[in-house]
Amino acid sequence: MAETVDGKKEDADYKRVQSFPLIRHTDMPEEMRVETMELCVTACEKFASNNESAAKMIKESMDKKFGSSWHVVIGEGFGFEIKKQNSS
């Protein structure tokens, strides 16, 4: 990889590698999963430099379309896992 003055090529390469949605596991119905991925991509493109606004857009849209109680986490350099407990 060729170096440039400010390391811009390395930054661009890193962002290009990370520019696709990835779902490792979900119990969402297929239609909801596809809609959610499209919404997430749209919000992250629209608010590329403002993760808080992207998360707010996703949460509000999901709450409106699928009912409240959605949580949205957007950021860099971390991982997380969220599990839903079924009530008995």
Image: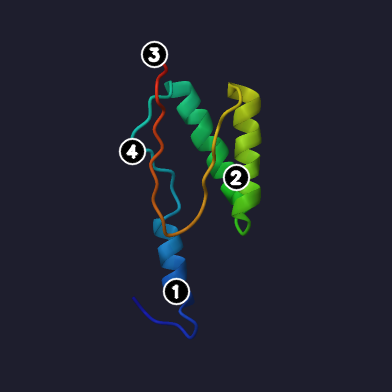
Quarter of the image where the N terminus is located: bottom left
The residue at which mark 2 appears reads as: 55
Q: CA distance from mark 1 to mark 3?
A: 53 Å
Task: Choose between 29 and 17: the one closer to the eye.
Answer: 29
Depth-wise, is mark 2 or mark 3 nearer the camera? Answer: 3
Q: Which mark is residue 88?
A: 3
Q: Residue at x 33, y 38 (%)?
A: 24
Q: Residue at x 44, y 74 (%)?
A: 9
The residue at which mark 1 appears reads as: 9
Residue 18: quadrant of the picture: bottom left
Q: Which tag, 1 or 3, sits closer to the chain's start?
A: 1
Type of amino acid under label 4: Arg
Q: Which tag, 2 or 4, sits closer to the chain's start?
A: 4
Type of amino acid under label 1: Lys
Q: CA distance from mark 1 to mark 4?
A: 29 Å
Q: CA distance from mark 2 to mark 4?
A: 20 Å
Depth-wise, is mark 1 or mark 3 nearer the camera? Answer: 3
- Residue 7: x percent and y percent? 45, 79
